[in-house]
C-alpha cells in the first residue's frame, strides 16, 4: 500500500488540512493518509493550546465524514484514499521525532511504501530535524506548496541525500491552491468571538464551543 503520514499539532484541524490531504492523495495515488497529531514538536517547544484529548477528538470528528476513519492498518475505501488517525505520538508523550515514528511504522508495515506530507515552510528547516539523513532515506517527503508561497528551496537537501534522491523528492512535490486559513487564525477568531463557519467542519466547531476551547482569558474582578 502507498501510505502518507501527515503530522502536525492540528490545533485545531481545519478544512485546509483536509484539502491538502485530498490533493496529495490524488496526485500520488495514495491508499491511506494517516493524520499523526504530535505531542510536543521539537521545533515548537511551547506546545499546542488545546489538550491532546481535544485535538485527537477534533481530528476524529473532522475525518468521520471522509472515505474512512480509524486507525493505521485498516483497508482503504473504494472511493478514494482512507483518511485515518494514529495517536501513537500522543501515547508516547514527550517530544515527537518524526524519524522515531517512521522507523516504528516501517517495522510494523515493511511492505508498504511510505510518504511524509510536509509544507514547503517546514521543509525549509529539514536540516534541523532529528537525524534528517536517515529520515530522507526511510521515507519520501511530499513537499506541498500552497499558492502564494515562495518556490520550494531544494538546496536544503544538499549534503543530505544524493542527486538522484533529490530528483525523486522533487517529482513527489504537490502544488496546492491558495488556502487562506490557518489554525492560528482560527484560534484568534474564536478568542475574538468571530465566526469560524466554513473554516472547520461543523462537528469540530461544535466541540470547540462545547469545551470552550481557545477562549480569550478574562481578568478576575
Image (spheres, helix red, strand yellow):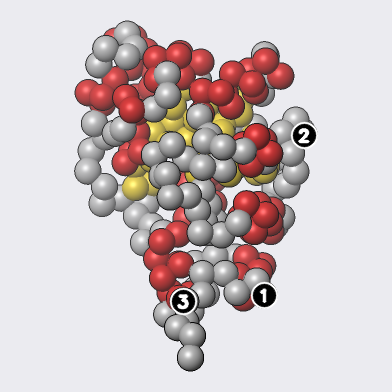
Label 1 sits on residue: 210
Tell me whether the residue at label 1 lies in contact with that at label 3, contact meaning CB atoms closer than 8 angstroms.
Answer: no
Q: Which residue is mark 3?
A: 216
Q: Which mark is residue 124?
A: none
Question: Where is residue 131 drawn, in percent x and y?
Answer: 42, 18
* Residue 179 shows in this picture: yes
Q: At x 75% / y 30%, what residue is drawn?
A: 73
Disc 2 designates what residue? 74
Left or right: residue 91 versus residue 101 is: right
Q: Helix or strand or loop: what does disc 2 sit on?
A: loop
- Does 76 appear above or below 180? above
The residue at the point 73 percent across, 47 percent down is 69
Horizontal and vertical percent position of residue 165:
37, 13
Graded by Cα atoms within 10 Å as few (under 14), some (14 to 19) or many (20 or more), the crowding at tag 2 reads: few
Q: Residues within 10 Å of mark 1 (few under 14, many from 20)?
A: few
Is 174 in front, or is 156? 156
Mark 2 to mark 1 CA distance (whole Å): 31 Å
Quarter-of-image position of residue 179? bottom left
Disc 2 or disc 3, which is closer to the eye? Answer: 3
Amino acid at each position: 500500500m502507498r501510505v502518507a503520514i501527515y503530522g502536525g499539532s492540528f490545533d485545531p484541524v481545519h478544512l485546509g488540512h483536509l484539502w491538502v490531504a485530498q490533493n496529495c492523495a490524488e496526485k500520488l495515488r495514495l491508499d491511506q493518509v494517516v493524520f499523526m497529531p504530535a505531542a510536543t514538536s521539537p521545533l515548537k517547544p511551547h506546545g499546542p493550546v488545546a489538550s491532546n484529548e481535544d485535538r485527537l477528538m477534533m481530528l476524529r470528528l473532522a475525518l468521520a465524514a471522509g472515505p474512512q476513519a480509524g486507525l493505521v492498518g485498516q483497508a482503504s475505501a473504494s472511493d478514494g484514499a482512507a483518511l485515518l488517525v494514529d495517536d501513537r505520538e500522543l501515547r508516547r508523550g514527550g517530544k515527537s521525532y518524526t524519524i522515531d515514528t517512521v522507523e516504528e511504522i516501517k517495522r510494523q508495515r515493511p511492505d508498504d511504501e511510505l510518504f511524509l506530507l510536509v509544507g514547503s515552510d517546514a521543509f525549509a528547516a529539514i536540516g534541523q530535524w532529528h537525524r534528517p539523513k536517515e529520515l530522507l532515506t526511510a521515507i519520501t517527503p511530499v513537499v506541498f506548496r500552497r499558492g502564494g508561497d515562495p518556490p520550494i528551496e531544494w538546496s536544503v537537501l544538499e549534503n543530505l541525500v544524493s542527486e538522484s534522491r533529490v530528483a525523486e523528492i522533487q517529482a513527489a512535490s504537490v502544488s496546492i491552491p491558495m488556502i487562506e486559513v490557518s489554525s492560528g487564525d482560527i484560534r484568534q477568531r474564536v478568542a475574538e468571538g468571530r465566526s469560524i463557519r466554513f473554516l472547520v467542519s461543523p462537528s469540530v466547531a461544535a466541540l470547540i464551543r462545547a469545551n470552550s476551547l481557545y477562549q480569550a482569558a478574562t481578568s478576575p474582578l
